[in-house]
Image (tube, rainbow, N blue to C red):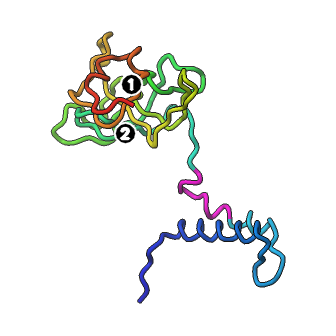
Amino acid sequence: MTMRLLSRDSELFIHFVYICIAKLSGHTRQGGFMSNSYLWSILPNLTNGNFLSQRRTFIQMGTILKVVDNSGAKKAMCIQALKAGKKGARLGDTIKVSIKEALPNGKAKKGDKFSAIVVRAAMPRGRCDGSEIKFDDNACVLIMSKSKDKDPVGTRVFGPVPHELRKKSVKILTLAEHIA
C-alpha cells in the first residue's frame, strides 16, 4: 500500500518544473531531444482549477465573495456592481449581493439581498506611493441597503482591510481588526 503525499496537480507541477530546468540546463529526457511541444502538451494538465489558472479580474455579476463580518452570512454572490466602471467593481466599490451560505442564527439568511462594500479584492490596485495592494480572496462587508451612511449589518469585521476605505466608509475601518 502506498501513501500519496502530493496531489495530482502538485505532482504535475513538479514534473513541469523539473522538465523546464532540464531543458534550460541542456539535459534531455532519455538522451534524446526534448521538444517544446512536449512541454505544451502537459501544460493543460497543470492549469485545470489550480493556482496556475487563477486570473485576477474585476468583481462582476456572478462572482462569489467571502463575507467577513459577523452578520451570519458566509458567502455571497455579486448580482450587480453599483457605480462601477464597465468592467466591474474593485476595492471599495458598492455592490448588490445575494447570500449563498449563512449561519442558521445570524441576521442574514440564505437568499436575502443586501448591499455590500468590497473590502478585499484579488485584483491588484495601485497606491499613491507606487506600490500595489492585492489580496488572496475577494471579500465584502454587508451594509444596510436603505441607509445612505453605509451602516454595516455586523458589528465586527474580520481580517485585514485596506486604508483606502477611509474615503468611502470610515465605519468599516473602525470595526476592522487589521488595517493594511
Q: Which residues are magenta?
A: 43-53
Residue holding disc 1: 117
Give neighbour class at mark 2: few <14, some 14-19, many 20+ (Cα, 10 Å).
Answer: some
Seen from the viewer's position, the closer of residues 3 and 133 is 133
Residue 159 position, x and y percent, is: 32, 37
Callout 1: helix, strand or loop?
A: strand
Residue 13 sits above or below residue 124 on the image: below
Q: Is residue 22 left or right of residue 166?
A: right
Residue 12 position, x and y percent, is: 59, 69
Amino acid type shown at disc 2: Lys
The quadrant of the rendering that contains the C terminus is top left
Callout 2: helix, strand or loop?
A: strand
Seen from the viewer's position, the closer of residues 109 and 14 is 14
Give neighbour class at mark 1: few <14, some 14-19, many 20+ (Cα, 10 Å).
Answer: many
The residue at 82%/70% (across/down) is 35
The quadrant of the rendering that contains the N terminus is bottom left
Farthest left residue?
Answer: 105
Question: Which of the labelled discs sits on residue 66, or is there none?
Answer: 2
Seen from the viewer's position, the closer of residues 29 and 49 is 29
